[in-house]
Amino acid sequence: MKIEHIIFLIHPCCYENLALAAIRRDNLYLFVDREEEVKQRWLHALNERPAATLFLQLGGPEYLREAAVKRLGDAAVFYPRTAFPDNGDLREYYRCLVSDFHNHISTHRLQLDTATVTSELWGESFEGCVPGYGGAFAEYLGLQRPPCMRFEMTVYDSRFLYGARRWEVIPIDGCDVEAWIFECHDGTGAAIFQSRMRAQWVDDRRVQLRLDDRRVQVCTKNGHTIWPPTPWEKGKPERVEAYSMTLADCNWRWVRSVGMVIDDFRKVIGAARVTTEI
């Protein structure tokens, strides 16, 4: 069989085995519901997939793997058992994952053309493991076409994405990086940068921006502000400053508009540049 398309399902079903006490303590109900909703989409999509699809599930429950095998066949489903290295070296782990992937391809006599194969990303979380491992698989497998992030097939970590009105993707000129912009339920904006062809957790390229310290903030996935260092208040001069972060940082940092309409926010994010400069 020649593989024409790959589905990367990354770390699915993180919430379903949590104890009710833990869900209540950390108020995780929103994420539990999102996970169940998205899981049903995964299962439905598997029933619609053609036989030329390879399903790669990294972690998660065996019943998802079994559902994929039932639809696609054992050869077209790769569920790596690759051990994480004791030294915690991510690049070593990526190399081992890809080695095991090639062993699967060879064992089942599959054909893979990295110049033409397409792929897509599902899983948990949208801001972390999915782009982190998605970019790593693209880089270490040598894919020539960037994987397509399927936001509707992911579970996010950021509460402010709940009820988002709309989202769009802005490719950053001259590289593989995409900016994802969301118009949140309250009309504010949220933007995140993701590598598509590089292993993002070890990607030291930098996103360079110019941000207004009155109208824009940088925050964590939990909503904690990390820039500006002190909040703007009445009487304080409004300044536009350079802001820089690595692509590795972008796994957990959002740029948020707190006093800017979405069209103006889009211009700020669209003006970002990715460089190797510190």
Image (cartoon, rainbow, N blue to C red):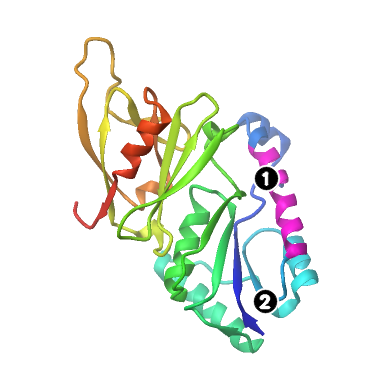
Choose between 197 and 27: the one closer to the eye.
Answer: 197
The answer to whether residue 211 is above or below residue 63 is above
Residue drawn at x 20%, y 33% is: 241
* Labelled disc at residue 123: none
Viewer-closest of 129 and 271: 271
| Residue on which the image places disc 2 | 52
Tag 2, which secondary structure?
A: loop
Q: Residue at x 29, y 57 (%)?
A: 204
Q: Are marks 1 and 2 in contact (CB under 8 Å)?
A: no
Tell me the amino acid under the disc marked 2: Ala
Quarter of image, res 78? bottom right
Above/below status of 17 relative to 265 = below
Residue range highlighted in magenta:
31-48
Q: Quadrant of residue 271?
A: top left
Who is closer to the viewer here, 27 or 109?
Answer: 109
Q: Earlier in the sequence, mark 1 or mark 2?
A: 1
**Disc marking residue 35:** 1
Give, as a three-letter code, the residue at label 1. Glu
User: In this rendering, would 210 be left or right of 108?
Assistant: left
Residue 195 relative to residue 101: left or right:
left
Which quarter of the rendered picture does the N terminus lie within? bottom right
Residue toward you, 58 or 110: 110
Residue 240: x %, y % from top left: 21, 30
Question: Principal SS element in the magenta part?
Answer: helix
Q: Residue furthest front?
A: 263
Q: Residue at x 72, y 45 (%)?
A: 36
